[in-house]
Image (tube, rainbow, N blue to C red):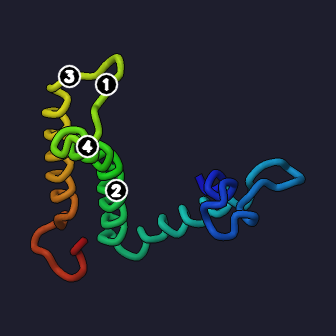
Amino acid sequence: MIYAFARDGAIPGGKFFGMNETTKTPITAVWAVVVVSILLGMLRFASVAAINAVFSLCAIALDWSYMIPIFCKLLFCGVLGMVPFKGGPFHMGKLGFVVDGIACTWILFVSGILMMPTVYPVTAINMN
């Protein structure tokens, strides 16, 4: 992804993360991902609460990446009616809006659960 963003000029220093002329591979982009992964992995040595917070944040971000387009469909095609919804060959008709509402509600519920501490009693050391 770093290479794709660098290629399209979406991140600063795109030339640095671009294609290596000798090997024809994005070596610096790969090494940037390796370094970030190592740094995130080293959080495990700092504190269990820190790595749990990172994992929870990643799960919440992934869930919200699904919810945002679903919510936009509900809002703009359903509630506001600004955009007519044209379903593809496998859409659920009117039931799709109900399923979308349930999905958004579920994601909000799960996000709340993932934000809670993993142990009780909560102290400054084990708080997410």
N-terminal-most mark, 2 or 4: 2
Q: How far apart are labels 2 and 4 at the CA level?
A: 27 Å
The one of 40 and 115 positioned closer to us in this rendering: 115
Q: Mark 4 and 3 residues: CB-CB less than 8 Å, in contact?
A: no
Q: Which residue is mark 3?
A: 93
Badge 3 marks a residue whose secondary structure is: loop
Foreground label between 3 and 2: 3
Q: How far apart are labels 3 and 2 at the CA level?
A: 28 Å
Badge 4 marks a residue whose secondary structure is: loop
In the image, farthest residue toward the bottom:
124
N-terminal-most mark, 3 or 2: 2
Residue 94 to residue 122: above or below: above
N-terminal-most mark, 1 or 2: 2
Say which quarter of the image contains residue 102.
top left
Q: Which residue is mark 2?
A: 61
Q: Mark 3 and 1 residues: CB-CB less than 8 Å, in contact?
A: yes
Foreground label between 1 and 4: 4
Badge 2 marks a residue whose secondary structure is: helix
Q: Could you tell me residue 41's position as x and y percent?
A: 48, 64
Please tell me which residue is depicted at 25% across the width and 44% down the height of the picture: 76
Q: Which residue is mark 1?
A: 87
Please tell me which residue is depicted at 15% across the width and 43% down the height of the picture: 79
Q: Which residue is mark 4?
A: 82
Q: Residues within 10 Å of mark 4 (few under 14, many from 20)?
A: few
The three-letter code of the residue at mark 1 reads Gly
Q: How far apart are labels 1 and 2 at the CA level?
A: 27 Å
Q: How far apart are labels 4 and 3 at the CA level?
A: 18 Å
